[in-house]
Image (cartoon, grey):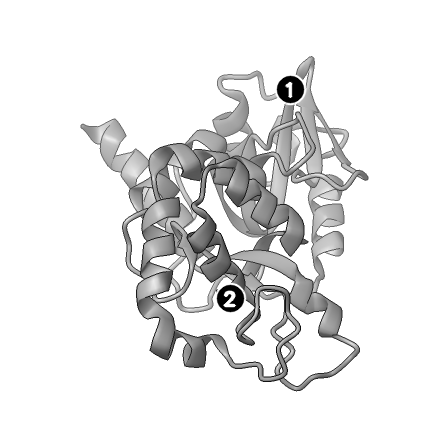
Amino acid sequence: MSYIIYRGDGTMPFNSLKNGFENEDEFVLNLNGKRIRDIAFNLQLFIYDIFGDIDNSRVVSCYKNMRLQKYDIVIKIGNVIKRVSIKKGVKNSVHAEPISEFIHFLISNNMPRDMVINFLKYHYADGTTNGTGSVRVSASEYKKTHQNEIDEINSFINNDTFLRKCIDRFILKGRNSYDKVDVLIYSVPSDFIWIKANDIYNILLHHKDDYSTGIHFSNLSYQPLNRCLNYNSKYDKCRFISQLKWYNIGDDIIENMNNNVINRKN
């Protein structure tokens, strides 16, 4: 199989003017109701990769998922369904939820009480565990005096068993869904790359020990939705939302694709 190679120099249109919803619509438009042989070549490669050896006269059905779940579109050929998450642009947010629910998730996975407290202090960075402090500081400022606590948290959360649960929650399933993402697409229909669910586990588990000064779940960076350091009441509620960002998603997908090519040659 051939792959589209992203060179990391901005030549792929990850930052096209289309917003995420318009991008999903375009994928549906390019696939739905068309025979495989009649769709664009890069989309054909994608279809063959996720569906396997299939006759090119088969008709593709594709539609948007209107529910609040991790997958954005559904691709169906015959009775086989593939659920697809689509990302584009930079600084991709892959998950957000109330901090109260996020902390419950950590506690349910046996994070020690003192570590939970330190996690909350990192989240709010105002000297409290509930966001009521009067002096808020940036993440970089907070790290200057609390790096050891952050390192201890990262050591606890970056193990294979817990990370698999986190990948399910943050990327593949969400908090309340039984349906799982089969493949994640990055970019737009004219020029995109992709990674399948098993490979998402593999690449993120591979990077679990990469060092970061901030709280991270492998290559997924943790932060509040907004620290609201300017005390703007319009965004203050964002301080109570946990967010995970996959900053180098394109690089990780390319690394995975290259690894797969090497493994096939061996």
Residue under the point 60% across and 41% down: 40
Looking at the rendered image, the quarter that the C terminus falls into is top left
Residue under the point 61% across and 82% down: 229
Q: Is mark 1 on a helix, strand or loop?
A: loop
Relative to residue 75, is residue 148 depicted above or below?
Answer: below
User: For residue 30, what is the image quadrant?
Assistant: top right
Q: Name the residue under label 1.
A: 57
Question: Which percent across, then down, holds residue 99?
Answer: 63, 55
Three-letter code for the amino acid on which mark 1 is drawn: Ser
Q: Classify mark 2: residues with Cα within 10 Å, few (<14), some (14-19) or many (20+).
A: some
Residue under the point 61% across and 29% down: 180
Q: In this view, does 62 lie to the left or right of 214?
A: right
**Towards the viewer: 143 or 26:** 143
Confirm whether residue 191 shows in the render: yes
Nearer the N terminus, badge 2 or badge 1?
1
| Mark in the foreground, 2 or 1 | 2
Relative to residue 155, is residue 57 depicted above or below?
Answer: above
Q: Name the residue under label 2.
A: 121
Q: In this view, does 93 lie to the left or right of 257?
A: right
Q: Is mark 2 on a helix, strand or loop?
A: helix
Separation (CA) of disc 2 from disc 1: 57 Å
Looking at the rendered image, the quarter that the N terminus falls into is top left
